[in-house]
Image (spheres, rainbow, N blue to C red):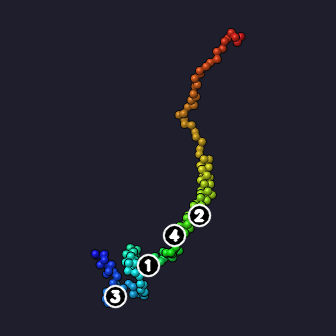
């Protein structure tokens, strides 16, 4: 019930006189023009306009600026623009791969080789001893002194 009453009041023209002058004080330097639209479209636009800006003019300007900036038309299919966007993304990926291949990897390899050369040789600790493992002998050759003579 309240929503219908608000919608009907929103569509009524403003009364002339003091109320109109108070309402329009910030807009005195602009000239206005009227546009005729269907009632249900006007209601939708008013709701939308309240969400994105302070005035209907600002909301409409923002929408027009968006369409112009992105080179869009309400009649166009967005699939065409998605293809263009995908091509641009693929181009950016190719550029990043090229940078990685020709700049990042060689630089990392040079730095790695510098760090490998700069490492001091490992010195044995004083406490370490050279311990040789003694292997267990499993078989021995028997020497027969009688035969060797």
Q: CA distance from mark 1 to mark 2?
A: 34 Å
Disc with the residue nearer the chain's start (4 vs 2) = 4
Image: 54 above or below 128: below
Label 4 sits on residue: 78
Label 2 neighbourhood size at 10 Å, few (<14), some (14-19), many (20+)? few
Label 1 neighbourhood size at 10 Å, few (<14), some (14-19), many (20+)? some
Q: Is residue 16 left or right of residue 100?
A: left
Disc 3 secondary structure class: helix
Image position, residue 108 (x, y; %): 59, 53
Q: Nearer the viewer, residue 24 or 85?
A: 85
Label 4 neighbourhood size at 10 Å, few (<14), some (14-19), many (20+)? few
Q: Any mark on residue 60, and which?
A: 1
Circles 3 and 2: CB atoms closer than 8 Å: no
Circles 3 and 1: CB atoms closer than 8 Å: no
Disc 1 secondary structure class: helix
Instruction: Locate residue 149: give its quadrant.
Output: top right
Circles 4 and 1: CB atoms closer than 8 Å: no
Disc 2 secondary structure class: helix
Residue visible at 56% across and 68% down? 84
Image position, residue 117 (x, y; %): 62, 47
Disc with the residue nearer the chain's start (4 vs 1) = 1
């Amino acid at each position: 019930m309240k929503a219908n009453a608000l919608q009907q009041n929103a569509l009524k023209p403003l009364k002339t006189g003091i109320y109109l002058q108070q309402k329009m004080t910030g807009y005195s330097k602009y000239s206005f023009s009227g546009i005729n639209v269907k009632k249900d479209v006007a209601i939708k636009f008013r709701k939308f306009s309240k969400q994105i800006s302070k005035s209907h003019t600002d909301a409409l300007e923002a929408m027009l600026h968006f369409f112009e900036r992105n080179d869009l038309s309400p009649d166009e299919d967005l699939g065409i623009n998605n293809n263009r966007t995908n091509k641009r993304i693929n181009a950016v990926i190719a550029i990043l791969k090229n940078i990685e291949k020709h700049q990042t990897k060689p630089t990392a390899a040079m730095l790695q080789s510098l760090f490998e050369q700069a490492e001091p040789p490992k010195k044995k600790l004083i406490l370490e001893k050279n311990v040789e493992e003694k292997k267990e002998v499993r078989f021995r050759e028997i020497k027969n002194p009688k035969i060797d003579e």
